[in-house]
């Protein structure tokens, strides 16, 4: 059994949903199909939630009505029989009645999760109507029946595995299951979501839970590229990556995949394929245990970085100094991306400034603190990259004209990261594209 996940743009129009139906019935292998919300829906639902949180029920009502009008148009194009259209309109009535009811009750954080869940519930139910219209044998598999997270918002893999396998065994003759990405239940049994990685994370968790033959992630891009095609003039697709390489690229800015979504597949050695709904014949990218070759594969950029430098003469030979520094970041639940140390200073980078004022205040007890905002991490990723002197020479020669403020090298054999001012991001990516790939 395989898992196929389709993102918001892949189901964003009735015609796209029809193409997805063709893709999932192209072979006879049993499969679980994971769908995101129709593109734009989640943003609208977030906006509705924010308006309710601020007490602006009038504008929230306008947004709900506008969203409903979009979906009425959507189903009028998707459903071409009276039976299908009636079923689709009943689904819209159910979910938009819910959104209108919440206008009259007190807003809460738990309610906001219910609001967000409507997107995936709508897309899967409407897709199911279309499959019924086409006479395609399938079953809706509610994610809220098996997908769960614990008190730390981490997925409960053993429980997910037990629940989903029981459902599949009870419906062993069903060749196709449709389920929601992103949504789950929390430790209290309330509707919640996976946050990091969203629907990709759902697909990877499901693939791990059922020991899938493959986990296919279908988007509007033909796999991972060697550089950011939105910034760099010439890029090339990558045919194969190891899990480690893909995780490094995802963590350090490759937008096509969230780093969290690699972990479950890697733990259970489930190959992941990144494919393009608009160009299904394209090879895409295969992510598996094996790397295709040694050397540089791709460059990724992560924006919104802040560098924090702590200087202290007391650091010299001071036992436990670094521990005290890291404890401050841990206390404020702020993760560190890069770190460099010297005899009298330690520099780290963070991508979350929400607790920065408190962090600075506590770090100033240890020494002088300097802050540099608007930085970008540029990561060069490849299999055993750190062992390739030729690649390293090309890398550092390429960026001679760039004011690099930090270098992280040796922490991973697959990654060399540079910190540069964000204003130099495009120049750095272009120089590396030319110096490392000859493009």
Image (cartoon, rainbow, N blue to C red):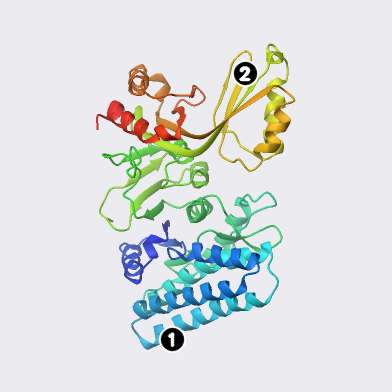
Residue drawn at (71%, 20%) of the image: 321
Q: Residues within 10 Å of mark 1 (few under 14, many from 20)?
A: few
Q: Position of residue 227 (x, y in %)?
A: 34, 38
Q: Dot 2 lies on which element?
A: strand
Seen from the viewer's position, the closer of residues 381 and 54 is 54
Instruction: Estimate the spatial distance between the alpha carbons at disc 1 and disc 2, rounded to whole Å.
Output: 68 Å
Q: Residues within 10 Å of mark 2 (few under 14, many from 20)?
A: some
Q: Position of residue 107 (x, y in %)?
A: 68, 68
Residue drawn at (72%, 23%) of the image: 366
Pick the quarter of the image with the N terminus.
Answer: bottom left
Circles 1 and 2: CB distance less than 8 Å?
no
Seen from the viewer's position, the closer of residues 57 and 73 is 57
Q: Dot 1 lies on which element?
A: helix
Residue drawn at (52%, 72%) of the image: 63
Q: Which residue position holds label 1?
A: 86
Q: Which residue position holds label 2?
A: 345
Above-or-below relation of 331 to 80: above
């Amino acid at each position: 059994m395989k898992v196929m996940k389709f993102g918001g743009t892949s189901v964003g129009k009735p015609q796209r949903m029809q193409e997805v139906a063709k893709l999932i019935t192209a072979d006879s292998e049993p499969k679980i199909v994971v769908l995101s919300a129709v593109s734009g829906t989640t943003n609208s639902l977030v906006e509705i939630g924010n308006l309710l949180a601020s007490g602006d029920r009038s504008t929230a009502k306008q947004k709900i009505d506008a969203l409903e009008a979009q979906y009425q148009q959507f189903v009028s194009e998707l459903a071409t029989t009276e039976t299908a259209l009636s079923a689709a309109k009943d689904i819209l009535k159910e979910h938009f009645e819910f959104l209108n009811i919440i206008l009259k009750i007190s807003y809460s954080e738990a309610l906001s999760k219910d609001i967000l869940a409507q997107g995936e519930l709508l897309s899967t139910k409407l897709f199911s109507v279309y499959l019924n219209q086409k006479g395609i044998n399938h079953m809706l598999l509610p994610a809220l029946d098996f997908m769960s997270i614990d008190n730390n918002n981490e997925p409960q893999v053993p429980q997910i595995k037990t629940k989903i396998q029981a459902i599949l065994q009870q419906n062993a003759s069903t060749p196709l299951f449709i389920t929601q990405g992103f949504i789950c239940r929390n430790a209290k049994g309330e509707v919640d979501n996976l946050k990091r990685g969203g629907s990709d994370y759902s697909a990877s968790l499901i693939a791990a839970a059922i020991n899938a033959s493959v986990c296919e992630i279908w988007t509007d891009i033909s796999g991972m590229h060697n550089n950011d095609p939105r910034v760099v003039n010439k890029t090339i697709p990558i045919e194969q990556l190891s899990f480690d390489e893909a995780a490094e690229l995802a963590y350090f800015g490759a937008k096509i995949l969230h780093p969290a979504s690699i972990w479950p597949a890697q733990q259970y050695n489930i190959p992941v394929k990144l494919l393009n709904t608009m160009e299904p014949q394209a090879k895409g990218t295969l992510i598996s245990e094996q790397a295709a070759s040694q050397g540089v594969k791709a460059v990724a950029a992560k924006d919104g970085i802040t560098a924090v430098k702590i200087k202290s003469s007391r650091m010299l030979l001071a036992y436990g100094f670094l521990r005290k520094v890291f404890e401050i970041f841990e206390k404020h639940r702020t993760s560190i991306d890069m770190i460099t140390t010297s005899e009298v200073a330690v520099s780290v980078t963070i991508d979350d400034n929400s607790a920065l004022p408190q962090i600075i205040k506590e770090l100033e007890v240890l020494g002088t603190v300097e802050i540099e905002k608007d930085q970008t991490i540029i990561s060069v990723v490849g299999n055993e990259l750190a062992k390739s002197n030729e690649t390293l020479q090309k890398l550092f020669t390429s960026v001679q004209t760039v004011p690099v403020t930090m270098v992280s090298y040796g922490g991973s054999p697959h990654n060399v990261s540079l910190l540069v001012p964000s204003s130099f991001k495009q120049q750095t990516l272009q120089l590396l594209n030319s110096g490392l790939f000859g493009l």
